[in-house]
Image (tube, rainbow, N blue to C red):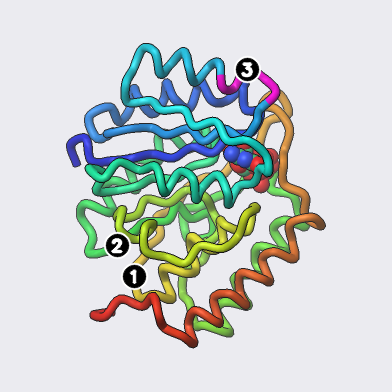
Amino acid sequence: MREALSTILIAHNEESAIGLMLEGLLAGYNQELLEIIVVDDASTDQTADIVSRFAQRDPKIKLIQRTPPCGVGRALKTGFASVSSRAKYVLTMDSDFVENVGQVRALIDAIENDDCDGVIGSRFVRGGKIVRYPFMKRVMNRLFHATVKLVFGVKQHDLTNNFKLYRAEILQSMPWQSDGFAMNAETGLLPVLAGYNLIEVPVVWVDRDPKMGKSKFHLIRHGGAYLRVILHAMKMARSKKSVRPNA
Ligand SMILES: Nc1nc2c(ncn2[C@@H]2O[C@H](COP(=O)(O)OP(=O)(O)OP(=O)(O)O)[C@@H](O)[C@H]2O)c(=O)[nH]1
Ligand SMILES: [Mg+2]
């Protein structure tokens, strides 16, 4: 995949991590990368300045600065709409996934060598691991997956991790809805229901070190939105409007 990969990093106040992410991605995947799009939502720290400095030195780096209302879903949708038409693959990551940069290679190898449309970096398959994952977040995550297994029969174990490498067409063709964190569930679930073949490779997930800024995820505030994703997916599955003709 020579210069065929567009990477979207979503960021809100990530000054301690964003530079490490950009350095790591450029050092490890310069040959594969066509662009890195950082979608910054009204950060009040140095995030945008740091990205701007990288962008001045390297034309592959692009900064998009959104204005409120903020949100993970809004930022991802903006990112999807900004992907170059020359990109064959799109990688999405959180900006604090510094520990995961080395694992992008496994996702690239999988999409190049396996017969699939996308690869999810999975914390919940053999070989995957989570370090310091808050208990209630884990309970909610497993509940979400048990529900979608029951309702839709999906076999993937970690649809909600924002560590996904997809063929670009997938991201342009889905009826994305969520504005917040629950978008991470949609980007896993909707393509599966549309008939795309998503495989999982094991990754390690390390919860944010307190030195790396604050978490923006609030279980109570964002939890209900995951239920809305399931309802949206049920509607989509019923209408089958976005199912590929040959799926
Ligand atoms: N653009 C944008 N990015 C956001 C927003 N909220 C969170 N993010 C980013 O989304 C990613 C995930 O947010 P985190 O705060 O790391 O949430 P989490 O991964 O569930 O929790 P921890 O890693 O434990 O903090 C990070 O890259 C954030 O910077 C937002 O409103 N807009
Ligand atoms: Mg995080």
Q: Could you tell me how far apart the alpha carbons at marks 3 and 1 are, in whole angstroms?
A: 38 Å
Q: Could you tell me how far apart the alpha carbons at marks 2 and 3 are, in whole angstroms?
A: 36 Å
Q: Are marks 3 and 1 in contact (CB under 8 Å)?
A: no
Say if residue 96 shows up in the picture. Answer: no
Looking at the rendered structure, the kind of residue marked 2 is Asp
Q: Residue at x 54, y 53 (%)?
A: 161
Mark positioned earlier in the residue sequence (2 or 3): 3
Which secondary structure dominates the residues rendered in magenta?
Answer: loop
Q: Is residue 196 above or below residue 109?
A: below
Q: Residues within 10 Å of mark 3 (few under 14, many from 20)?
A: some
Q: Residue at x 20, y 55 (%)?
A: 113
* Mark 2 C-beta to ligand 1 under 8 Å: no
Task: List the residue tagged with mark 3.
Answer: 46
Magenta stretch in the rendered image: 44-48
Estimate the x, y position of residue 54 in percent, counting from the top left.
43, 16
Task: List the residue tagged with mark 2.
Answer: 117
Task: List the residue tagged with mark 1.
Answer: 196
